[in-house]
Amino acid sequence: MSVIDIELAMKHLRAESEDQDLVQSQLDGAEAAAMAYLNRSFYADQASLDAARLSAPTKRAAAVVDYDVSMLAAQAIEDSDQRSEAEADVRFIFAETLESVARAARGLVVNKAIEAACLLKLGHLYANREEVVTGTIATELPLTSKSLLAPYRIGMGV
């Protein structure tokens, strides 16, 4: 479920009520893209952010235990090619889990700039429902969603 209220998104798009499922799906995608760009999660309120931060150490510890158990199982595979692939998979899953925990721990409460960036992205997704547009000229506006998100971005992001 998204952080931004669906009613605000519907108003922003001037969408009809029968489009609400589509708008919700695209809003979820816009928020996910913004979080990926920021390399951090955002939350509806301080309580949600605090809960995510408090759970980070437990999730990290569980990831280490899962890694150790999975790596032992992978190392028990006799075929060297399969063992190497299994070990690589274990390392990949471990790295992704730690990244996810870090994004949550470094999260922030959604603000008006992030909300506006997500709504801009949503507007683009809603207006351009195909990957290719023919017969038109497209220009990126100078105040894009990236400009709104940039001050809150950490690390390299996506």
Image (spheres, rainbow, N blue to C red):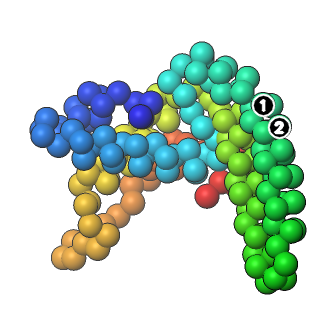
Which kind of residue does numbered mark 1 sit on?
Thr
Instruction: Tell me which residue sits at (56%, 44%) in the image.
Output: 35
> Residue furthest toward the top?
47
Q: Residue 96, which numbered label?
A: none
Q: Residue 61, which numbered label?
A: 2
Q: Where 126 sits versus 129, above or below?
A: above
Q: Find residue 95 and report its horizontal and vertical position in percent.
A: 76, 55
Instruction: Tell me which residue sits at (78%, 48%) in the image.
Output: 66
Q: Is residue 2 left or right of residue 62?
A: left
Instruction: Tell me which residue sits at (71%, 57%) in the image.
Output: 93
**Residue 33 in view, yes or no:** yes
**Residue 153 in view, yes or no:** no
Q: CA distance from mark 2 to mark 1?
A: 5 Å
Q: Is residue 24 left or right of residue 101?
A: left
Viewer-proximal residue among 99 and 150: 99
Which kind of residue does numbered mark 2 sit on?
Ala
Q: Is residue 102 left or right of residue 141?
A: right
Q: Find residue 84 and report its horizontal and vertical position in percent.
A: 81, 76
Are the residues flagged by discs 2 and 1 in contact, CB closer than 8 Å?
Answer: yes
Q: Residue 58, which numbered label?
A: 1
